[in-house]
Image (cartoon, helix red, strand yellow):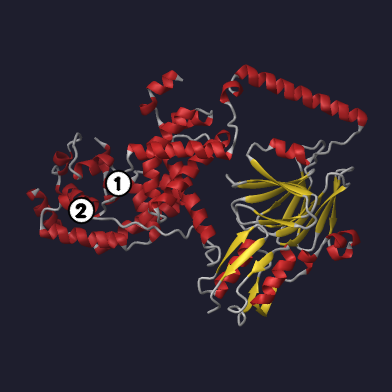
Amino acid sequence: MNELRKRKDNSSDIALWNQLRLGNEEAFSSLFERYYSTLVNYGKTLMTGEDRVKDCVQDVFVNIWTYRYKLYKLNEAILVKAYLLSSVRKRIARLHHREHIFSNIKNIDSLEFLFDFSIEDRLIADETTAKKVEQLNKSINQLSDRQKEAIYLRYQYGLAVDQVAEVLNLNYQSTKNLIHRAILQLRKDFPISVLFLLLNFSLN
Amino acid sequence: MQKRDFYENIEDFLSDESFQKWVKGNDDPLNWSEWTVENPYRAKLVEEARLWIIGMKVEQTPLTNQETQKSLQKVWKKIGRSNEERPDKLIWHNTWFRTAAAVFVVGLAALLYYANLSSTQITTITYQELIKSDSNGLIEQTNNSDKPQLITLSDASSALLQPNSKLSYPKIFTGNERKIYLSGEGFFEISKDQNRAFYVYANETVTKVYGTSFRVIAYANQPNVQVLVRTGKVKVSSNQNIRNATLEEVMLLPNQAARFVRKEQLFEKILDITQDKPLLASTNTMEQLSFDFKDIPVKQIFKTLEQAYLITIDFPQDKLKECYLTTSLIDVPLPEKLKIICESLGNNSRYEMNGNYIKIISNGCK
């Protein structure tokens, strides 16, 4: 016990997960502290109302503890992070589904992605860059909900493609295509001339 | 050679955490600046990737530590509520204790088996045993009156509990199963949830549904347990805990029933309820009333509901005088029936439910 307390902050997710499955309360709390904020932020991209989102994330953890003896033994391939993100998503989808039981939404994956990417203004040095970035940003925000969510998960949380697939409940190939097609689409909207780039770059 | 030397497209850069950090101006331990200018093609890619990162900012503030701690406390509180006694890890995680327990259980099982072999006595399961084995804090409702009693569950399912019957259920369903325990008789209308099966435990039987309506008759002192289906699909099986449970299962469709003969521990399937006299006698108004309404005055619909559920519905008679409705309310629990009616009336109509008394608040229909 004491030993775990000491190395609490640098134990790996997997180690904490396995401790949790054995009923270790500290491991549970550590994982909660590590991911609560991330999960709430992710939840907010799928559902409005911060309090509702927090409730949802908390319930995910309540269930994890309640059914700890039945949890999977996760391995390196299925990150704890991906598992948690996916649990939050499923829970929100279920809530969403229940709320819309009368409006004929049959597919539980019809979740909207309610998030817009913004622009890192402080890194823009000149007018031309500003224009390009603005256009790119607009194109990204016009992608389909699914594509946007995949990109968000992939680049914001650094999930690998198979982990994104796990969260979105898709298979590997469709997820790969989803992201790939999004990137192609953006590049089409956003051709950059080599000359411009080289010039601009040497200025930085 | 480094991994990044093989980067060929934007995706490679975007998913590289150290690259992202460098672009955002944090630090550059891997010396991206120098690496970039090593060749022009690379520089083009890097600049493009840089613009992408600038245009894909995620503006989300992390929660404070304090906030997280507050929520963690809330989680422990919720956990405490969802299972009153947390399985205590102190003794259970002692290997010796576990071994001893296992030996004890095996021994006990063997003893019971032989005891049963010799006496051919059949084990029955009672309601009391069932609720004892559920560790979630259950609420128990007993109907001692002479009229059926309406119970609404946390998932908006409803149960009409007959006199001299008992129902135990959790205040809030958690996890991916919904389990309730019955002694006596009840008519159930279960709200649909494909992800969470609903189980009714009654004596030696378990009835599993996803969203349907059906009646279960399981009095402790009667020789049979009976399950009658009104709508949807229902699976009835014997409780795994009974001896020589061959895990029998019966699938039932509307107007079918299953009778579990407790002495023989066998199921009998009845393909048409109307052809079976004893069963027909046990159906009542609920099964005989139609909830399919075609251009019917709302007033009359409320009357039908009052009859079926033995409730009182209080509604503004004058305002709803001219309202006619065409709707099918079969197959949904009472709260959903009321919700559908209120939604069809429009005009911010709503209902309030207080036990067997329901108040409709409405300014008339659209």
User: Residue B311: x percent and y percent?
Assistant: 70, 63
Kind of residue indicated by mark 1 = Thr
Position above or below: B79 against B188: above
Q: Earlier in the sequence, mark 2 or mark 1?
A: 2
User: Residue A36: x percent and y percent?
Assistant: 40, 41
From where the camera sits, is residue A166 visible? no
Chain containing the residue with disc 1: B
Q: Residue B323 vs residue B64: left or right?
A: right
Query: Can you identify the residue that label 1 sits on?
Result: B61
The answer to which quarter of the image holds residue A136 is bottom left
Query: Can you identify the residue that label 2 sits on?
Result: B51
Q: CA distance from mark 2 to mark 1?
A: 22 Å
Kind of residue indicated by mark 2 = Leu
Q: Residues within 10 Å of mark 2 (few under 14, many from 20)?
A: many
Position above or below: B43 against A184: above
Front residue (pair A163, B106): B106
Q: Secondary structure at mark 1?
A: loop
Chain containing the residue with disc 2: B
Front residue (pair B203, B11): B203
Q: Are marks 2 and 1 in contact (CB under 8 Å)?
A: no
Tell which residue pokes out farthest to the right in this image: B119
